Image (cartoon, rainbow, N blue to C red):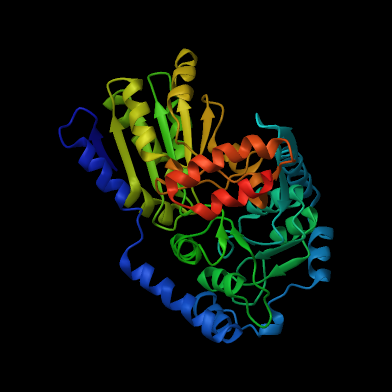
Amino acid sequence: MRLLRFSSKTFQTDLANFCREAVVPKEISDSVAAILADVRTRGDEAVVYYAAKFDGAKLRAREFLVKSAELKAALSDLPADQRKAMEAAHENVLAFNRKSLPADWIAKNKQGALIGEVHHPIRRVGLYVPGGQVPLVSTVLMTATLAKIAGCPEIAVFTPSNASGKIAPSLLAALALVGIEEVYRIGGVQAIGAMTYGTANVPAVDKVFGPGNAYVCEAKRQVFGTVGVDSLPGPSEVMVIADETAPVNYAAADLLAQAEHGSGREKIYLVATSEEKIKEIETEVQQQLKLLSRSEKTQRVLNDGFLAIQVGSLSEAVQIANYVAPEHLELMVKDSATKQLVKGITTAGAIMIGANTPTALGDFTAGPSHVLPTGRTGRFFSGLRVSDFLRRTSLIQYDAKSVVKGSEVVAAFAAMEKLDAHGKSASIRLK
């Protein structure tokens, strides 16, 4: 763990340097570019090659697509308690995200013209679901459910297989539960390449969604413009803001919960109002770490990506949070202070309020999607929502009366911008 003090003269530089470590190094960027170029050129052949190289899976191109019978069997065989948990989470995700479905509207502007907006689902979307050692079953619910609410006609899901070409049964069950029928056992950069450029066996998509490791996140960044991307949700982040009331064991458990993703590029922040509280939480982290099954990988994250910051006030904590723009932000402070923090912090992906709200509840069941921006991209990206799966089109309709008023404005702008044809296109309708 590294410790910074807000009062230090070098604090801003030290914090910026720590955050900058989340930027992918040139070797990752170059590797991603090479893989994408290869998939674009060789298609399925390249996808097969990288699936074997990185996942150990000896797949044939015709085996990319998961058979519907496999999806149905996974749901049928799912233990009752797991199905109950999925259904409870799915119900909350549906309820929350249906509320954010934008409505079409039409009205008149001051010139008397009809104006409005209509929304259409994106025709074909590609959803990336991390798999491998940690199959993120919950990501299925947090992405596919939103695409279903939006009414996207084609939803293709991509997730890596193990060396035997198999996908975790619980993940397949979740896909079946949500009603996804097109699933590819492809992961990594090669999956982003396949869904972007298309191959003989994988039709290209219009927009890519979902979280991933540093390589997947960088791949999404590089293909943006060829396809749309939802945001850049990479390795996990959490920031815990703790005052003297914060339960030490809760804070430690929540820091470890995000560190255990274990890629080595996670960022774990502890912002506390006293050095004593920081030391207590750090000691508790090490005690709880001994009981975790993924302790070795978690320790690596703690060694490289754990930053503690001592602040003199919660207003200083607000400044730090707004700079870092953490993916997950937990407020373990006295009740009277939460309103001030929620109002002041404007860049967090999701805010968990109070000591009884661990990030895991947001990850799995609360309702909002857990696909959130990382690496300070929360300054300009928001968490995944239904509107990300929609296109908005403006509607404009002038008639013989309203065009008279509108043409006066057009004439003025055409003169200012020296665009005669623009002006004439409106004035010709006045004759």
Residue for point 60% across, 69% down: 160
Seen from the viewer's position, the closer of residues 160 and 400 is 400
Image: 118 above or below 296: above
Question: Quick check: 12 left or right of 41?
Answer: left
Residue for point 53% across, 42% down: 411
Seen from the viewer's position, the closer of residues 79 and 174 is 174
Residue for point 25% across, 37% down: 3
Q: What is the tally of numbered marks visible in this picture? A: 0
Seen from the viewer's position, the closer of residues 424 and 317 is 424
User: Which percent across, then down, holds residue 224?
Assistant: 50, 62
User: Which percent across, then down, holds residue 170?
Assistant: 71, 58
Q: Residue furthest front?
A: 431
Residue 197 appears anywhere in the view: yes
User: Which percent across, then down, holds residue 48?
Assistant: 58, 83
Residue 394 appears anywhere in the view: no
The image quarter containing residue 226 is: bottom right
Image: 43 above or below 257: below
Question: Quick check: 7 left or right of 328?
Answer: left
Q: Residue furthest top?
A: 336
User: Which percent across, then down, holds residue 294?
Assistant: 48, 54
The image quarter containing residue 1 is: top left
